[in-house]
Image: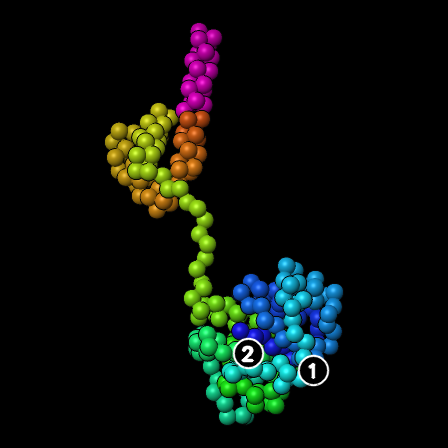
C-alpha cells in the first residue's frame, strides 16, 4: 500500500505522517515535490519512524509517484463539482485491501492548504472523504493518514490487540477470600448475624463483577489480615487502659 503526499509544505507534517504510517503497519511513503525534505523537523516529528522517512521515495511528478500503481484513491475533504464516486473510509478500505493483494495501490493526499488539485483527482478511480463535522472539515495531514491507516488495518483483519497476561484466581482462592472476609467483618463488628447472609451475597456479586486475579486476592487478604491485627492490638490497648483505671 503506497501513501503518496503531494507537494507537502511543512516538513513536520511529513514526519508526523511517517509516524502515523508506521503505527498502522504502512511503510511505502512517496513524496511529490516536498518543499523541505530531508529535514531535521521531519525527523523529530517522526519519532521512532525515521526509517520510514529514510526509505521514502521523492518524486518530481505525479506520474513518477504512481508508476506501476493500478488503483488510486484520492483523499479529499472538499465537495467537488467533478462527477466521481465518493466513499467513506470504512467503505473504501476493503476495496483497496482486496486490490493490494494482487497489484500496487496508492492513497493520494494533497497539499495541506488546498488538498488535491482537480488534475490530481482526475488520476484517481474514486475519492475518500472522512465524515468529519460538516461545519469544520479541516483535518491535519498526519491525522488523516492515521485515520485512513487505521481503517486499512481494520479492513485487512489486523485489528487484534495484544491482551495483558491475566492470572485469574481459582474458585478455591476466591472462596477462601470470602471466608476470610466474613470472619474479619464479624470480628471488627461490621457484620452481624441477622444481616450476614444477605450482605455477603451482595459482596460476592460485587467481587464477581471484578473477576479477581490471584495477585488481587493476595492484596485483599493482606488488607484483611492487617485489619484483624490492628483490631487485636486496639483491643489489647483498651483492655490495659481499663485495668489502669481500676
**Taking the image as drawn, is residue 225 in sight?**
yes
Residue nearest the viewer, comparing 38 with 12 = 38
Name above or below for residue 74 compared with residue 215.
Answer: below
Earlier along the polypeptide chain: callout 2 or callout 1?
1
Mark 1 — residue? 60
Residue sitting at x 74%, y 68%: 39
- Using a 10 Å C-alpha cutoff, classify the residue at mark 2 as few (fewer than 14 neighbours), some (14 to 19) or many (20 or more): many
Residue sitting at x 63%, y 59%: 48
Residue sitting at x 40%, y 31%: 221
- Using a 10 Å C-alpha cutoff, classify the residue at mark 1 as few (fewer than 14 neighbours), some (14 to 19) or many (20 or more): few
Question: Could you say where residue 105 lies in the image, as x and y percent from the top left?
Answer: 52, 78
Question: Could you say where residue 144 lies in the image, as x and y percent from the top left?
Answer: 57, 72
Check disc 1 and report its element: helix, strand or loop. Answer: loop
Residue nearest the viewer, comparing 118 with 140 = 118
**Taking the image as drawn, is residue 96 in sight?**
no
Mark 2 — residue? 106
- Residue range (magenta): 227-246
Answer with the quarter of the image where residue 123 lies.
Answer: bottom right
Amino acid at each position: 500500500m503506497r501513501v503518496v503526499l503531494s507537494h507537502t509544505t511543512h516538513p513536520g507534517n511529513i514526519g508526523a505522517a511517517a509516524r502515523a504510517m508506521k503505527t498502522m503497519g504502512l511503510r511505502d511513503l512517496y513524496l511529490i515535490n516536498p518543499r523541505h525534505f530531508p529535514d531535521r523537523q521531519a525527523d523529530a516529528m517522526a519519532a521512532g519512524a525515521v526509517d520510514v522517512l529514510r526509505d521514502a521515495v521523492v518524486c518530481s511528478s505525479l506520474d513518477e509517484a504512481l508508476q506501476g500503481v493500478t488503483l488510486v484513491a484520492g483523499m479529499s475533504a472538499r465537495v467537488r463539482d467533478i462527477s466521481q464516486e465518493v466513499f467513506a473510509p470504512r467503505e473504501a478500505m476493503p476495496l483497496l485491501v482486496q486490490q493490494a493483494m494482487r497489484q500496487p495501490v496508492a492513497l493520494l493526499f494533497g497539499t495541506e492548504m488546498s488538498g488535491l488539485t482537480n488534475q490530481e483527482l482526475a488520476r484517481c478511480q474514486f475519492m475518500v472523504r472522512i465524515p468529519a463535522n460538516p461545519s469544520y472539515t479541516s483535518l491535519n495531514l498526519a491525522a488523516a493518514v492515521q485515520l485512513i491507516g487505521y481503517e486499512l488495518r481494520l479492513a485487512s483483519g489486523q485489528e487484534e490487540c495484544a491482551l495483558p497476561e491475566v492470572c485469574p484466581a481459582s474458585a478455591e482462592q476466591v472462596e477462601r477470600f470470602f471466608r476470610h472476609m466474613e470472619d474479619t467483618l464479624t470480628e471488627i463488628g461490621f457484620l452481624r448475624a441477622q444481616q450476614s447472609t444477605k450482605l455477603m451475597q451482595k459482596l460476592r456479586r460485587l467481587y464477581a463483577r471484578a473477576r479477581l486475579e490471584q495477585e488481587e486476592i493476595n492484596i485483599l487478604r493482606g488488607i484483611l489480615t492487617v485489619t484483624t491485627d490492628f483490631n487485636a492490638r486496639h483491643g489489647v490497648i483498651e483492655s490495659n487502659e481499663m485495668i489502669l483505671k481500676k
